[in-house]
Image: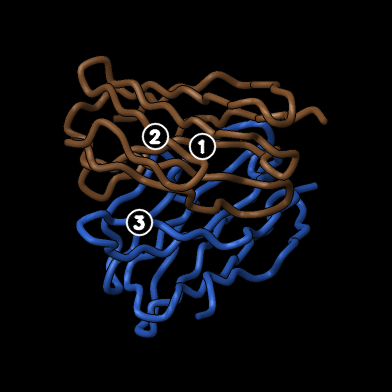
Amino acid sequence: GEDVEQSLFLSVREGDSSVINCTYTDSSSTYLYWYKQEPGAGLQLLTYIFSNMDMKQDQRLTVLLNKKDKHLSLRIADTQTGDSAIYFCAENNFNKFYFGSGTKLNVKP
Amino acid sequence: EAGVTQSPTHLIKTRGQQATLRCSPISGHTSVYWYQQALGLGLQFLLWYDEGEERNRGNFPPRFSGRQFPNYSSELNVNALELEDSALYLCASSARQGRAETQYFGPGTRLTVL
């Protein structure tokens, strides 16, 4: 459960969709999370998904979970400049939380 | 509802000194987690406290220690500071949302070791 991997950077144009990907290794993880970190700030919980779900939608955010491939993605529709931040995925395995190294999303106007 | 608070915001120490960082969880939360975020890196799990007890610790040397008080606030102590201890230290408290154990983070303490 300690190897949560994410690509380091993603650059998109304002108005486009962003897709941030994450892979994890522990199939017994019960919940998977997406957090957003803006410069100089702590992490803000965006959304989470239970491991027996395939998809969860919350306004502009769509989380897809492929449990077979241990792949988690976060889609942000109509990306805005205010979405520029670092996005972390995390897995919860019996109250042990493991975080990826974060994907820096840059939104160009 | 007040969020997780941490103090101080910034802390500057010299090598060999001790640092004490403080965290107050959201009211009603009994679990506190500590993480180290070195520049450009992800979060490394340090410690987990629940109901006053240390429940788990990450792969850090014993000079990283802490405690949780009866009011569920927590303290992280770092002894014999080294230059590589310079990082953002994040505290999180957790609660159950539905069946999910969810963490809420404070703004962090930026520790600089000179």
Q: Colour of chain B?
A: blue
Compared with A73, A98 (above or below) is below
Q: For mark 2, give the secondary structure.
A: strand
Q: Amino acid at mark 1?
A: Phe
Question: Could you tell me which residue is drawn at 36 percent across and 63 percent down?
Answer: B94
Question: In which quadrant will I find the C terminus of chain A?
Answer: top right
For the residue marked with disc 3, what is the amino acid? Thr
Which secondary structure, mark 3? strand
Pointer 2 residue: A63
Q: Is residue A21 left or right of residue B14?
A: left
Find disc 1 in the rendering and name its residue: A88
Residue displayed at 69% across by 69% down: B8
What's the mark number on residue B102? 3
Q: Is residue A28 above or below residue B28?
A: above
Crowd around label 1: few <14 · some 14–19 · many ≥20 (10 Å):
many
Q: How many angstroms separate mark 3 from mark 2 (CA)?
A: 16 Å
Q: Nearer the viewer, residue A54 or B61?
A: A54
How far apart are the alpha carbons under marks 3 and 1? 14 Å
In the image, residue B104 above or below residue B67: above
User: Which residue is at 21% across, 41% downward?
Assistant: A30
The residue at the far top in this view is A69
Hey, which quadrant is residue B29 in on the image?
A: bottom left
Q: Report in which chain the residue with disc 2 lies.
A: A
Characterize the local packing of mark 2: few (<14), some (14-19) or many (20 or more) Cα atoms within 10 angstroms: many
